[in-house]
Image (cartoon, coloured by chain):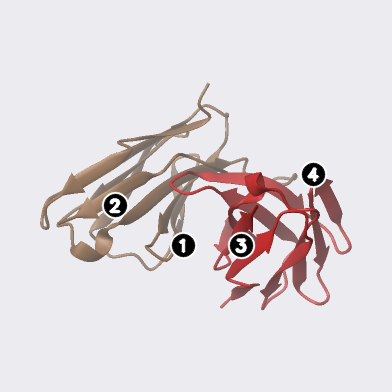
Chain colours: A red, B brown
Amino acid sequence: ELKVEQNPLFLSMQEGKNYTIYCNYSTTSDRLYWYRQDPGKSLESLFVLLSNGAVKQEGRLMASLDTKARLSTLHITAAVHDLSATYFCAVGQYTGTASKLTFGTGTRLQVTL
Amino acid sequence: DTAVSQTPKYLVTQMGNDKSIKCEQNLGHDTMYWYKQDSKKFLKIMFSYNNKELIINETVPNRFSPKSPDKAHLNLHINSLELGDSAVYFCASSQDPLAGGPKTQYFGPGTRLLVL
């Protein structure tokens, strides 16, 4: 059974600092997603990583994928308060007739002034 | 235009009642999903339909029954509600996951269910 672990579970950081969220998964996959969830809101897609070595950047967020290590990272550069949210990674798996996502536990990010 | 919509947004009900949640997507996607997010924010897939056919049915009590009248709609009916059913239920949709492309899942706003 696929297990997806994120760390840290909670991250409090000051504005302007850099930090990385880690997502480890236990079985082979060719798709890794990052989502953002604001309190009481839906999930917003941030990145889709489809191959080993894939790197994507949007603003202060950069995601990367190492399929050999079964590791994805979400790097935050010069954090701002607006980035405060819960971030989820999700691993895609084919089951023969379907594809499903298994989500990580989420990382709650709090950016303080 | 809302891409994935759900109704109702909030649902407060007594134990033992039966309730339904509706979901509609206007993205032209073939596949729709139901997820449950518990109080610890953990998200787990419950069901998935592709072109009205059930393709994923995770270990979910029989009291939960999904129905897809067409590929743009996926409803969730819950019988004999229990306290442990209290959660946020998200609907999502994507392109056919067995086709090419990123197959990103787009989520609805969620239905917050509270069973008293």
Residue A85: % across, % down: 58, 52
The answer to whether residue B103 of the structure is visible from this angle is no
Q: Is residue A87 above or below residue A66?
A: above
In the rendering, which numbered label is found on residue A58?
4
* Badge nearest the viewer, 2 or 4: 4
Q: Position of residue B24 (x, y in %)?
A: 43, 32
Query: Are the numbered discs 1 and 2 placed on the same chain, yes or no?
Result: yes
Dots 1 and 4 on the same chain? no
Task: Check disc 3: other Cα within 10 Å, few if <14, some if 14-19, many if 20+.
Answer: few
Q: Which is closer to the viewer, label 1 or label 2?
A: 1
Please, which residue is most extreme toward the right here? A53
Circle 2 is placed at which residue position?
A: B65
User: Label 3: which residue?
Assistant: A96
Q: Nearer the viewer, residue B70 or B103?
A: B103
Please, what is the three-letter code of the amino acid marked with disc 4?
A: Glu
**Pointer 2 indicates a residue of which chain?**
B
Q: Specify few, some or many for label 1: CA neighbours under 10 Å numbering under 14, 14-19, or 20 or more.
A: some
Residue position for label 1: B44
Which amino acid does the dot numbered 2 rest on?
Ser
Disc on the earlier residue, 1 or 2: 1
In front: label 1 or label 3:
1
Q: Amino acid at mark 1?
A: Lys
Query: Reading the chain from its start, which is encountered first: label 4 or label 3?
Result: 4
Q: Residues within 10 Å of mark 2 (few under 14, many from 20)?
A: some
Residue A54, percent across and down? 86, 57
- Rounded to the nearest angstrom, the CA distance separating label 1 from label 4 is 27 Å
Q: Is disc 3 on the same chain as disc 1? A: no
